[in-house]
Image (cartoon, rainbow, N blue to C red):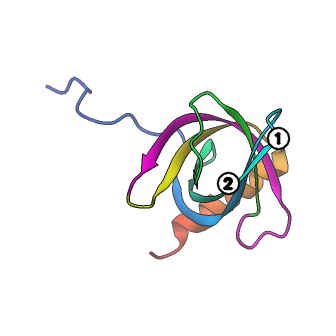
Amino acid sequence: MNSGSEQAPERKYLRVSADFPATVILPGHELILLGKAVDLSGGGMRVVTATDLPSGQTIVLRFSLPGLERELLVRGRIVLSFYDAAAKQYAHGVAFTQYAPQDQEAIASFISKAKEAPI
């Protein structure tokens, strides 16, 4: 008998590994953090920074996807934040809350190409 509690819930979006610079902007706080994206999905991103950010914090992410000339601006909210002792950085799970249709398409294209690429 499977109660369903033994398995993690299935993600809504496919998540792929990433490795590109991402700037984290805290609107209204005049704070800009340099970070790095470590994974990406259609619904969010994990970004690492040297600074801790609280869950619930609204942010704007500015980044360029590898192979794409233009910058994307995506609004999001920190849903998870923890200290990665091995990397000596803070990892932040960000849920996207608002992005332009062309940015959504660029992210979907990046994910599609990344999942097809050999590891």
- How far across and how far down the image is residue 43, in percent? 62, 41
- In front: mark 1 or mark 2? 1
Left or right, 102 with reference to 65: right
Left or right, 70 with reference to 21: right
Q: From this viewpoint, which residue is outermost toward the bottom? A: 118
Q: Which residue is mark 1?
A: 30
> What is the number of the mark on residue 3?
none
- From this view, report whether residue 94 is shown above or below residue 6: below
- From this view, report whether residue 114 is shown above or below residue 85: below
Q: Secondary structure at mark 2?
A: helix
Q: Is residue 81 magenta?
A: yes
Left or right, 48 with reference to 27: left
Q: Which residue is mark 2?
A: 108
53, 101: nearer the viewer: 53
**Label 1 Cα neighbours within 10 Å, binned few <14 / some 14-19 / many ≥20:** few
Q: CA distance from mark 1 to mark 2?
A: 30 Å
Q: Which residues are magenta?
A: 65-85
- How far across and how far down the image is residue 15, in percent? 52, 52
Quadrant (top left, top right, bottom left, bottom right) of the N terminus: top left
- How far across and how far down the image is residue 44, in percent? 61, 44
- How far across and how far down the image is residue 67, in percent? 74, 73
